[in-house]
Image (cartoon, helix red, strand yellow):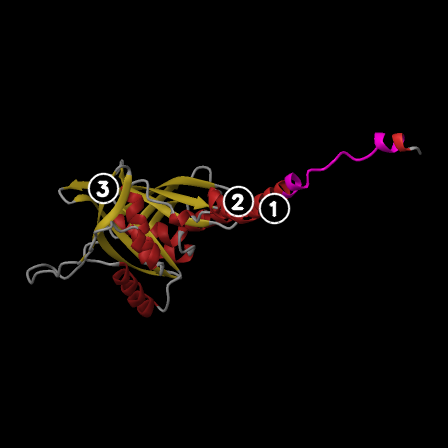
Amino acid sequence: MDENENNEFADPPRKWGRVGVMAAAWAAALALGAWVAPGFAASGNPENQDPRDEDATDANGAVWSYLRYGSNEDLDRADAVLCDDASPVLKPSDLDSIRESYSDSLGGITDIDLDIGDPVTTSDGISIPSTVFYIYQGNQRSEDFVVTVQESGGAYCVSNAVQVSEEEPSSDEGTGEAVDPKELATDFMRAIVVARDPNSAVAFQCSSYAGVTPQDVDAGITEWAATNGETTAFLNGVNPAESSETSITNFEVEISLSGGLNQESFAFTVGVQGDCVASLSGGDGLI
């Protein structure tokens, strides 16, 4: 190959200073990407955020979070629900102490359930009566609370919480305790749905009980869980309902089932007569 041919196919001249600058720029870009990418992966993806750390979107949600986490040994999350300047009568540590006392008396606690009442607007904020149920196998105890919530710009926080003490009966009152029909209906359904102990629910039934059996409901939940994965069952509300019989007080009870693949709610009607449950109906789609 002659000299002219060599010149024709020779590599183009390189500007080594420019090459060095470009190499340095690429190295810096790669280093920056390695530092920034994990941050985007960890914090930029909303799927990585624990749903328990999300802000409450309504007053009931704030109450639920405060009582649930405070009564379930998650005091940091309960504390996070408090307003910045809040000094509640009942602090998260107090909720934890109540839980511990029931754990000692029941022999342990396997679950915590809540019944959140209707919000009432007061001069202090939004007051919501609520009940926490401490459950161990087929046994349970409950405590009543009133939680006050503040709202500002769509954000909700707890400003106060108090425990409602039962008044001692006066000397001229009878010693017999009247049965609260709503509480009876709640205990009956909670034994079936939350404790998953249909046999203990039978103890609440009248001798003339009619309708869907606790075993029917339990079997329906078991079948639902087989389709939708590990399931959490809870009561979503207990509200008065119309009754065609004056001797029976009806309550509409909504239960919710939450599985890994689905969440559904089902409505039942519980009839209470005197000090026992007279009937159970509903459960369409589950039974």
Image coords of residue 52 (percent x, y):
39, 49
Residue bearing mark 3:
119
Element carrying mark 2: helix
The CA span between labels 3 and 1 is 59 Å
Q: Are marks 3 and 1 in contact (CB under 8 Å)?
A: no
Nearer the N terminus, badge 2 or badge 3? Answer: 3
The residue at the point 55 percent across, 44 percent down is: 227
* Residue 14 falls inside the magenta stretch: yes
Q: Residue furthest front?
A: 3
Residue bearing mark 1:
27
Q: Residue furthest right?
A: 1
Element carrying mark 1: helix
Image coords of residue 105 (percent x, y):
31, 69
Q: Is 286 left, or right, of 57 in this rendering?
A: right
Q: Residues within 10 Å of mark 1 (few under 14, many from 20)?
A: few
Res. 16 image quadrant: top right
Element carrying mark 3: loop
Q: Residues within 10 Å of mark 2 (few under 14, many from 20)?
A: some
* Residue 81 in view (yes/no): yes
Q: From which residue to which does the magenta span run?
A: 5-20
Q: Is 125 left, or right, of 45 in this rendering?
A: left
